[in-house]
Amino acid sequence: MKKGLLGVGYAVPRQDAWTKVTGEEKFAADYYPENLLWAGAKRAGVSHGRILRVDVAAAQALPGVVAVLTRKDVPGTNRQGIVHKDQPVLAGEKVRHRGEPVALVLAETREVLAQALARIRVEIEPLPAVFDPEEALQPGAPQLHERGNLLLRAKIEQGQADEAFKECDVVVAETFEVPFQEHGFLETQNGLAWQEPDGSIVMIVSTQAPFRDRFEIAHALGLEMGAIRVISPYLGGGFGGKDGATVQCLLALAAMHAGGRPVKMWWDREESFIAGYKRHAARLYYRAGAKADGTLHALHCRLYYDSGAYAHLGGEIMELGMEHAGGPYRLPHTCIEGWCVYTNNPIGGAMRGFGVCQVSFAFERIMDLLASKLGLDPLDFRRRNALQRGDKNCAGVTLVHSTGLVPCLEAIKRHALWTDREKWKQGAGPFKKRGVGLAAVFNAMGYGRGLPDSAIAKLELTPEGKFRIYNSVPDMGQGNATAFLQMAGEILGQDASRLELVPPDTARSLPSGSSSASRTTYTFGNALIRACQEMKEKLCHRAALVLMTDEVRGFALVPGKVRHLPSGRNLDLEFLAGLFPETDRSSVSQFVMPVAQDVPDTGKEFFIGFPHVFFSYAAHLVYVEVDELTGTIEVRDYLAVTEGGRVINPQGFEQQVQGAVAQGIGYALMEQVLLHQGEILNPNLTNYILPTSRDIPGIESMAVETVEPTGPFGMKGIGEVGANAPLPAIAAALEDALGLRLTRSPFTPDRVLGKMSQGAR
């Protein structure tokens, strides 16, 4: 985007669109400097075992091999992890999952690298393994860590749930299961690193958290954090799978043994599957009750999250699931219990929806079961119990900010897809059944209480009179970079040609947290607004001095100029830039996200990331058609209504919603990491099925605009909320079509046919 109007509320094209479609934009994978070395990891291939010997002699003897590194070559703690430092850079004593790295090779070419990795011999004594989180908690289960298999156990209580069930007129109970899900981003985990003559390490890496990467690398390798520079260009997808170290620590270690040469590590698709993080598999036990008048009254649920071999963010993901376990509804009596458990499965990690996708399936299906037993319309039942400002949510937190579920549901109720649903269902052809499903969801914004959630924006006036924004939070495709330019353009009165965005770089920009948790545009946007306002004030004061007037309020910024409105006189920004000393041509501002003040008792002294104070809301409606002969489910139409405060960019808003829905359809119908004894049976895109354009219907996106007073121009984040609804909505539509209740996803044709053969429940 080289020119054109910028401002809030416009459907502005993505500022990176042109450079991406022409190939001018460089992702981390596109860097190939001269004198390049390649690095790769030897993976254990065993789910649980004790390392007896790592024989690297044959690999070291291969021409073109520069170094072969094992645990003894790792300085520092050899432990990485965002919160819990329990994951080794290179395993030295035990392996806990098949993707565990046990050696690191540096070679002149990719071909030599592959040969060297094949020559490494790893002798591992197998140990008993466990692959089910509930089995892992049983006495006598194989133990993965010295602390045992329990990463985190917590409980959130409000009211008296056990007693409240006695007061319910209708009670339902069900168990739900969801599998591990792969992120499936186009650009797999990769980066480039080198060591400068002064010993510092520079890294260009596909990451969602460049500033936090420095902490992980420094801790794991015993380095000074200030000696690590991380540059984050645009990502070819992230979805949470690049939130936390993937290649970073291995790359830094490789750079330390490369003699100053650049080292590139780029996981192929199978390695990405085997070693990368996954959406947590979960088993969810639900029991809920309501009064005869349709008022929700009690909920008791037990949630088991499979963290795999290491913690990563498992505890925090479980906590967010617990906080959302009762859905966006008033529930006076709740008992929500959670277990996050180590197993010898692949490592669970952050993924769009961060623990909320799993419970959304459960609580929305429970809502349908209750509505059916009560004989109530499912939309009206949700509307009657929907959270509004001033209510307490299921975790006992009072909602004091924008709360827009009710208008989302009302928008669906007015829509033709709702009013005409019965007529549409009657039009199914031979051996086809049609159904309509509804889901209402919400998703918290930000890290939550107990974690510092802030952003620091830097804005610079260049000598040429243009504005340079130092972005601190990566754009992994969600479009936050364009939103930042729109906000700056709105305040500074400039078009796109006079604004420049510097990508995240720990040596140039300032710490602003990760690109995650639906927080990116909210936090950095607020900081950027303050920096722009400060710069605008500086320029107006300087212009007033030049024109010898004290009418500072009479000045306005227009493209390339500061204009004195009473007289119509203009001063070029380039001229004014020359009047500023270099040290005064920038503005820096920090924003700290507010946190909840009423903190429910969880029985934990330290419950990271709980509770949250901001939430986005959505209601989705789906039409499906089921083939009774094949069990295939076709999504025929989709309506997504989203409340995320004010819309900064309608085009970007719609893209976010549509992308989330597409990902959610995959989660509902086809995506699952197939495991046997910890081994991934479908570790590539040949047999791990992702939705394509043939699987995604036309998606109508509607925005319910509210104003969030704390947000930049009134907005909230919406990057995750749309991914939570497709699974429960499609499950409801499937039951509507066939009278069959599937409680385990995805709803593959074989599962549908199997359920049909059993008959309706």
Image (cartoon, rainbow, N blue to C red):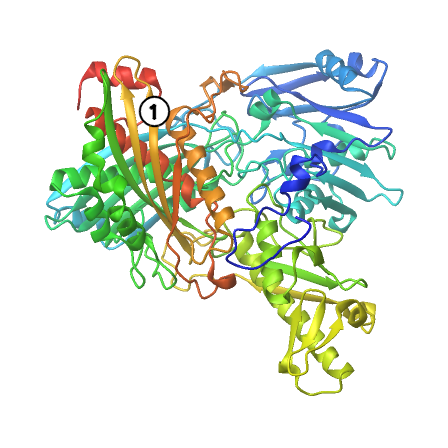
Residue 141: x percent and y percent?
42, 25
Residue 370: x percent and y percent?
18, 40
Does the rendering let one see residue 752?
yes
Does the rendering let one see residue 153?
no
Residue 253: x percent and y percent?
75, 34
Horizontal side, residue 420 vs residue 19: left or right: left
Of residues 438 and 199, the one drawn nearer to the viewer in this rendering: 438
Horizontal side, residue 478 vs residue 251: left or right: left
Q: Is residue 760 above or below residue 290?
A: above
Residue type at the position of mark 1: Glu
Of residues 489 and 87, the one drawn nearer to the viewer in this rendering: 489
- Total of numbered circles in the picture? 1
Residue 189: x percent and y percent?
64, 31
**If the image is split into quadrants, where does the C terminus sit?**
top left
Of residues 518 and 413, the one drawn nearer to the viewer in this rendering: 413
Of residues 175 and 160, the one drawn nearer to the viewer in this rendering: 175
The residue most toward the right is 197
* Residue at figure coordinates x 70%, y 32% from the top left: 29
* Residue at figure coordinates x 23%, y 51% from the top left: 383
Q: Is residue 703 above or below residue 620?
A: below
Q: Is residue 275 above or below residue 499?
A: above
- Classify mark 1: helix, strand or loop: strand
Residue, disc 1? 634
* Residue at figure coordinates x 28%, y 49% from the top left: 409
